[in-house]
Amino acid sequence: MRIRLVLAIGLLSTSASAQQRPPLLSEPVIDALAKELSGERAHETIRAISKNHRVRGSRPFRAAADFIVARAREGGLEDAKVEEFPADGKIFYGTQRSRPPWDAEFAELREISPGRSRLITSWNKEPMSLAEDSESGDVTAQLVDVGAGSSEKDYAGKNVKGKLILISSQADAGVPLGVTKYGAAGIISYAQNQRTGWWGENTDLVRWGHLDTFSPSRTFAFMVSPRVAKSFRDRLSRGERITLHAKVKAGQHPGAYSVATAMIHGADPRLSQEEIVFSCHLDHPNPGANDNASGCATILEAGITLSKLIKDGKIPRPARTIRFVWPPEIEGTMAILNAKPDWAKRIRAVVHMDMVGAGLESKSVFHVSGGPGSLPSFVYDIAQTFGAWVNDQTYRYAATGASKYPLVSPKGGKEPLLAALDEYDMGSDHDVYQDASWGIPAIYLHDWPDRYIHTTWDTPDRIDPTKLLRAAFIGAASGYFLASMSEKDLPAAKRAIDAGSLRRQLRMHERLSGLDDPEAANLRRYYSDYHTAVDRSLSSFVSPARTEIPDLAVRGPMSVFGYDYLSDKLGAERAGKLRLLEFQGLRGAGGDYAYEVLNLARRGMNAADIRNTVSAIYGPVPMNLVVEYLQALTEARVVPNIP
């Protein structure tokens, strides 16, 4: 219901302007973008990228990065190259412990039970069948079903020493007990996909598996489908002995994060020192089409299109520089911002794309999301204004066949976009930019849910070129407007803020229901302060002064990629007892609260005000949970003592 209401007000807020002219940018610029952007071209890029099994620091990842650089150069983007950041498991980039690169050369899982000799799966057949961070091994052993494989009861009465264990959990969950304590020789996991409304429906999906990069117990794990696992379980329950031969040649090695980057240099001598960044993440297992070859291909398409239109004289060169980056997810962005402080200081805003091409079969909803409540900015309203306009144009076309800008690809669908114009949604590199360590507002374009995410069915044939075209348009228009924006654009930007304010007022009134008087007053106060801060962000964006990045002992969120800072610094037992991380609020879970608490603490807010702010954002939370978490942050020397 919330998404419908937000979408409805988004459509209403632009219906009048859609009949007259596009928002924010002149019609010639909008027309040039709509005609030049190509969903088919982006789709072909996805097909090329998705052939590579793109694990951080691996040879296939570097091949994908080199392909991106070559296409960027062909498309006229400037300074296209691959930047490298050392990664060896010891170097830290802020709160991110660098993860050593991982490569695989060979992996096969065979059954060699009497009368049943057959290949179950292999690296050559399905690279996703080998869990990331698996180590080499050559084991012939019986298979033992241990259920989830993550608790003591799963192993009760079972001898798994030297055997292969079949588990329903993600691969790394079977290591502490199955491998480390009870001596299993390896793991066979049939972990299902992330839980959505379609969870468990397709028993042929093989899910991406991973082991703990930093675990002292080195092992290997194969991933199989629920259908294959059910056959194993049924046979084992009948008393059959199943013997498997697992052979793996893989492992970690010293190396580097490879980050492809390219630019469109700004025209203004002063403002060209400021940057608008287009971001995505290039890693993920083969095929990884929507997650996230789609985001990578779409920001490349936006860049090539903007570059060509500038070269052809169809749009002016923007005042600010536009940078495009293709890092490994989160850890690559952490490396960039920590190792390149000169880059970080220049970034004024980010357009981040992570999963933007899912077709109807994936059952996805497209989102144009705002930023965290701790970082108010007009930037989100810019993107949502374009999103609402594309909603209107594409709905008109789908409903009547008549729209000036249907944004439909020849080989794509004709459905309306129906993008949800909503609040902050965590889970990708935009979290890093918007952490108070840097405080850079980020537009987030993404699909969710996606029933094929992280599985062997996330393939290019399930990508819709029309969706890619529309995502590219919203991103390119938003990024270009921000890169070109000057004082003359303030009235148009203010109209975008007014539309965003209507959406925020609607949310506030929805959320007042059921709150007691103190919490209702707190919610009203938060939205009033947020509105003031958004107006202030607009004024500061066009001013010559740039707010300095705060001086911090360590930069970045607490939970990054494959590593948890608090668990390392305080111990897993101590960190595991932090009750805020398990708290479920009205509109957010523990990780959401923790992210905002850290942001607000880094901005110098006191404990009472932090509690009131996060309660307004995600729903009332007990003060003692916030104080306990703040004490842990202080103990880990992430923030100073908070009054």
Image (spheres, rainbow, N blue to C red):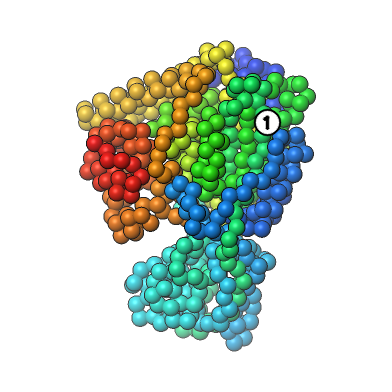
The residue closer to the viewer here, 21 or 402, is 21
Q: Could you say where residue 593 lies in the image, as x and y percent from the top left?
A: 35, 41
Q: Position of residue 336 (x, y in %)?
A: 55, 43
Q: Is residue 97 left or right of residue 125?
A: left
**How far across and down, in percent of the image, does residue 530 sit?**
38, 25
**Amino acid type, callout 1:** Ile
From the viewer's perspective, is residue 331 above or below residue 525? Answer: below
The residue carrying mark 1 is: 264
The answer to whether residue 105 is above or below residue 558 is below
Q: Is residue 38 left or right of residue 529?
A: right
Near-viewer residue (31 or 351): 351
Q: Nearer the viewer, residue 206 or 489?
A: 489
Q: Quadrant of the N terminus?
A: top left
The residue depicted at 55 percent of the width and 19 percent of the height is: 15
Question: Above or below — where is 139 with respect to 1?
Answer: below
What secondary structure is found at the residue carrying circle 1? strand
Which residue ends up furthest to the bottom in the rendered image?
A: 114
Residue drawn at point x = 58 percent, y = 34 percent: 277
At horizontal 30% and vertical 32% (from top left) the residue drawn is 605
516 relative to 486, above or below:
below
Question: Which x, y percent locates residue 602?
Answer: 36, 37
Q: Does residue 86 appear to the left or right of 626 in the view shown? A: right
Point 70% across, 29% down: residue: 306
